[in-house]
Image (tube, grey):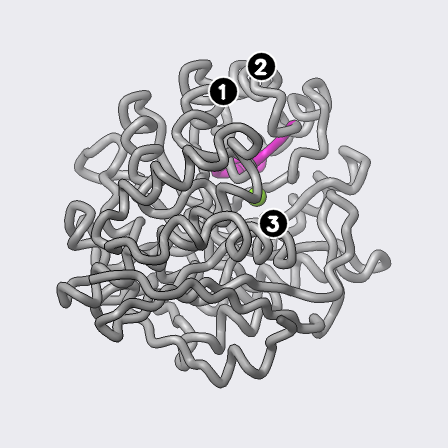
């Protein structure tokens, strides 16, 4: 089999209600960069790249595509190393690796479709046919009702049956942040796990002070307390607190994660399959994490393609550590406005009491609806 073409689909849509996080960017639109890899046997694979879509499109179209056209998609690891070697002198992390990720996911989709197997069967097998998902949301929308809107949103997820919820903090005041987290905790009770994400808005002493309050509220993990490049800062926060520190959504490849893991900078790592290097590289990141006895809970924020790729990866992820009642790897199930997640596979993914089935069909296990690509296409 030979790859005949790599096509990028750049999508954009206006959001129904703008929202922001501690980063301060107001999300007024959502974008997606979908990668389509075609072959001479009529099999098409789909991938998803995380990050600004125009940049990603340019990287795939002008830099990466020429190295995979004409090649055998089954040589997926050879192609990964070829692409990585090509960008090595200027792109060891960031958008170049997102571009490689999208192509890599599409190649695994092709291999699965060609063999009639779901990707998880090709990368080690099925540890779990369904994955426990946490509802990820609780951004900031209406500055006059930040606590009320968080409580209402969290109650909605709990009433849908979600067993875990992730909320944002970063209001520039420990008091305001903690009041809001405490209100959500009181609203959902102790039986729903609560995760708190700072999107790296704190310095080390701020993170430790907030973390001590989060411990009292029984928060499951404290995500990205400090800036992603501050590995020592993460380690310092991690040592100072009993609560689990998570991070890694802004890190790339096994080399980036090695630096986090060898310094025990965090208790949970969160590679994004659509950013950190695709399925090929995230398997290696997960193996490295296992060697450092650190659970891997992938970050997910993309289209239905990215969600399917994350579910395939999660299905084949061992428990860390294995035990009678393990802490299973969970799916980040983003709940903010995202038609690319809900419409691109025809049927949206659904959950039952917070559990999402791993697609059992071949490849990613989804059919991409081309009419949805046309509906949202900008390039
Ligand atoms: Mg996060």
Location of residue 302 in the rendering, given as x and y in whole percent from the top left corner? 51, 59
Q: Which residue is mark 2?
A: 232
For residue 167, which numbered disc appears in the image?
3
Some atom of ligand 1 lies within 8 Å of the CB belonging to the residue at label 1? no
Question: First in sequence: mark 1 or mark 3?
Answer: 3
- Residue 178 in the figure: left or right of residue 330: right
Q: For the residue carrying disc 3, how many other residues have a C-alpha within 10 Å: few (<14), some (14-19), or many (20+)? A: many
- Name which residue lies at 43% across and 32% down: 268
Q: Main secondary structure of the magenta part?
A: loop
Which of 198/276 is in front?
276
Q: Is residue 20 magenta?
A: no
| Tag of residue 252 | none
For residue 55, above or below residue 317? below
**Is residue 61 among the parts visible in the rendering?**
yes
Q: Quadrant of ligand 1?
A: top right
Q: CA distance from mark 2 to mark 3?
A: 25 Å
User: What residue does disc 1 label?
Assistant: 265
Name the residue at the right extreme: 144
In the rendering, at what x and y percent does residue 108 appear? 28, 56
SS class of the residue under badge 2?
helix
Q: Going by the image, does 270 lie left or right of 240?
A: left
Quarter of the figure with residue 113: bottom left
**Magenta part of the chain:** 217-226
Residue 190 seen in the current view:
no
Q: Quadrant of residue 319?
A: top left
Residue 298, picture quadrant: top left
**Nearer to me, 40 or 371:** 40
């Amino acid at each position: 089999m030979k790859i005949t073409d790599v096509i990028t689909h750049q999508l954009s849509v206006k959001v129904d209600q703008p929202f922001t996080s501690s980063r301060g960017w107001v999300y007024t639109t959502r974008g997606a960069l979908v990668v389509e890899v075609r072959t001479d046997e009529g099999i098409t694979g789909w991938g998803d790249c995380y990050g600004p879509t125009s940049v990603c499109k340019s990287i795939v179209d002008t830099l990466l595509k020429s190295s995979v056209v004409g090649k055998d998609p089954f040589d997926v690891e050879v192609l990964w190393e070829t692409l990585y070697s090509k960008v090595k002198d200027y792109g060891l992390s960031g958008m170049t690796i997102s571009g490689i990720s999208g192509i890599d996911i599409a190649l695994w989709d092709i291999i699965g479709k060609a063999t009639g197997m779901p990707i998880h069967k090709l990368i080690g097998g099925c540890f779990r046919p369904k994955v426990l998902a946490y509802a990820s949301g609780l951004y900031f929308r209406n500055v006059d009702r930040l606590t009320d809107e968080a409580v209402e949103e969290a109650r909605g997820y709990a009433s849908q049956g979600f067993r875990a919820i992730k909320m944002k903090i970063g209001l520039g005041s420990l008091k305001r942040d903690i009041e809001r987290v405490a209100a959500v905790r009181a609203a959902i009770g102790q039986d729903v796990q609560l995760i708190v994400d700072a999107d790296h808005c704190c310095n080390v002493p701020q993170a430790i002070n907030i973390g001590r309050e989060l411990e009292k509220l029984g928060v499951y993990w404290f995500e990205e307390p400090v800036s992603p490049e501050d590995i020592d800062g993460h380690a310092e926060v991690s040592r100072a607190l009993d609560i689990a520190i998570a991070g890694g959504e802004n890190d790339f490849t096994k080399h980036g994660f090695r630096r986090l893991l060898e310094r025990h900078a965090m208790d949970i790592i969160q590679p994004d399959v659509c950013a950190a290097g695709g399925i090929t590289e995230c398997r290696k990141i997960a193996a490295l994490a296992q060697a450092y006895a650190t659970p891997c809970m992938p970050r997910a924020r993309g289209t239905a393609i990215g969600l399917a790729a994350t579910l395939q990866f999660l299905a084949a992820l061992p428990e860390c550590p294995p035990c009678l009642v393990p802490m299973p790897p969970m799916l980040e199930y983003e709940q903010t406005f995202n038609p690319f997640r809900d419409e691109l596979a025809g049927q949206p993914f659904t959950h039952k009491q917070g559990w999402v089935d791993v697609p059992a069909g071949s490849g990613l296990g989804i059919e991409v609806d081309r009419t949805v690509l046309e509906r949202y296409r900008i390039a």
